[in-house]
Image (cartoon, rainbow, N blue to C red):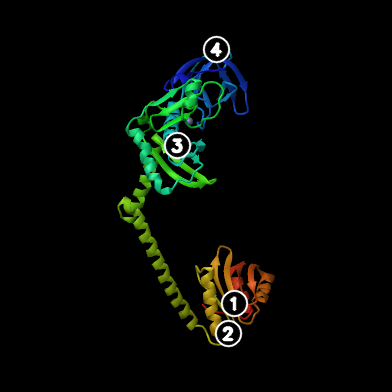
Amino acid sequence: MTEKLYYQNGYNTEFKGTVLSCEKSKEGYHIVLNQTLFYPEGGGQPGDKGTLGGVTVFDVHEKHGEVIHYTEAPLTVGIEVEGKIDWAHRFDLMQNHSGEHILSGIICKKYHCDNVGFHMGREEITIDFNAQIPLEDLNWLEERANQAIWENTPIEITYPEKEELEGLAYRSKIELAGEVRIVKAGEFDCCACCGTHVRLAGEIGIIKIVGAQNYKGGTRLELLCGQRGLAYFQKIQQASKEVGRALSVQEEKIGVGVQKLLSEKDGFIQELKKWKWQVFLHRIEKLPMDADSILMVEDGLSGKDMTSLADLAVEKNHGRAIVMTPSEDGFAFVLVSRKMDAKKIVEELKTSFDCKGGGKDGGVQGKLMGEREKILSFLQALGFYFAK
Ligand SMILES: [Zn+2]
């Protein structure tokens, strides 16, 4: 069994230990010491990082009471090494783990539910509850949790005797062999936990819920505490500042600004549609009366535009119309035919060009790949009048 120094004092960052074993592993080496400050992954909290004798420790796990340090290089068995844990990484986990306890304590008490999942990722932290938490309660829950920070509530760790434990109300109450570690945050929470925690809630800095979703019949909350909460706020503030500047509105009014912009955009689209229609009508007006097959080429038309223009043309000539818009390797096209031979024409195009299209005898939409001039000449040879 490794002596777990992190339970004696969660704030120490340096220690000395003797190397008991060193084994080569897939990713590096597995090292066991007689004692360690490195917290191994457990209870939702990731393992510590740091160095052992100058060698990088990138992860830590526990197996049968032994703490296994995953290192990048080997260490000699029997020697004493100096260990240093990455305090920024550890303190971030402590802030978030303690923040999670306080929020979970408040939620489980209010909704008579359990915390059924806890994950601390590199970016996000999620907590799952087996209760539906109303979205309108989130602000209140957040404020209540931050109350613990404002009161600088002590977070106390105890190992009560069996009899005392039986009478104690705490979360994660399951039959455990050996001593049970109780983490209590004043009136906010009491929970059995093996993780590392801050001494005073004030050190958490901030508890911020940044996401909520229905999850397996309950609720999954996304949470950020401490420096992560601050970094998140800075990121969001930067983004909203940029949007505000672009819209020339105050940051808190960017929602209204964006709505205004979107409705303006809808207005422009309607206006554009109207003008496009006018241009199409003008184009049709100029078509010769006697051409029963019309070919038109226009830049930047959508499939819908091409269909509208081709429909207008056949309304006038009662024949065929092919509208094309240049693409990278040829044309996109819409062919409409009142003579019900659109598919036949496509077959003819396929004899000379790479032509992909789908539709019916009355109309086909597709792509025509090949040299543009050749395509235009081919269509004119088929009897299409090229309306420039
Ligand atoms: Zn915990």
Q: Earlier in the sequence, mark 2 or mark 1?
A: 2
> Which residue position holds label 3?
104
Of the residues shown, which amino acid type is indicated by label 2? His
* Alpha carbon separation for disc pair 2 and 1: 10 Å
Considering depth in this image, is 291 or 254 the residue closer to the camera?
A: 254
Sequence order check, earlier mark of 2 and 4: 4
Crowding at dot 1, Cα within 10 Å, few <14 / some 14-19 / many 20+, comes out as: many
What residue did someone put label 2 on?
318
- Residue under pointer 4: 79
**Residue 189 appears anywhere in the view:** yes
* Of marks 2 and 4, the one in the foreground: 4
Residue 376 in which image quadrant: bottom right
Earlier sequence position, callout 3 versus callout 2: 3
Cβ atoms at labels 1 and 4 below 8 Å apart: no
Residues marked 3 and 4 touching at CB (< 8 Å): no
What amino acid type is highlighted by mark number 3?
Ser
Category of crowding for the residue at label 3, using alpha-carbon neighbours closer than 10 angstroms: few (below 14), some (14–19), many (at least 20): many
- Percent coordinates x, y for residue 280 in the rendering: 47, 77
Identity of the amino acid at label 1?
Val
Q: Secondary structure at mark 1?
A: strand
State the residue position of label 1.
336
The count of marks equals: 4
Check disc 2 and report its element: helix, strand or loop.
Answer: loop
Quadrant where the N terminus is found in the figure: top right
Mark 3, mark 4: which one is toward the viewer? 3
User: Camera-side residue: 343 or 66?
Assistant: 66
**C-beta proximity under 8 Å, tags 1 and 3:** no
Looking at the image, can residue 49 be seen? no
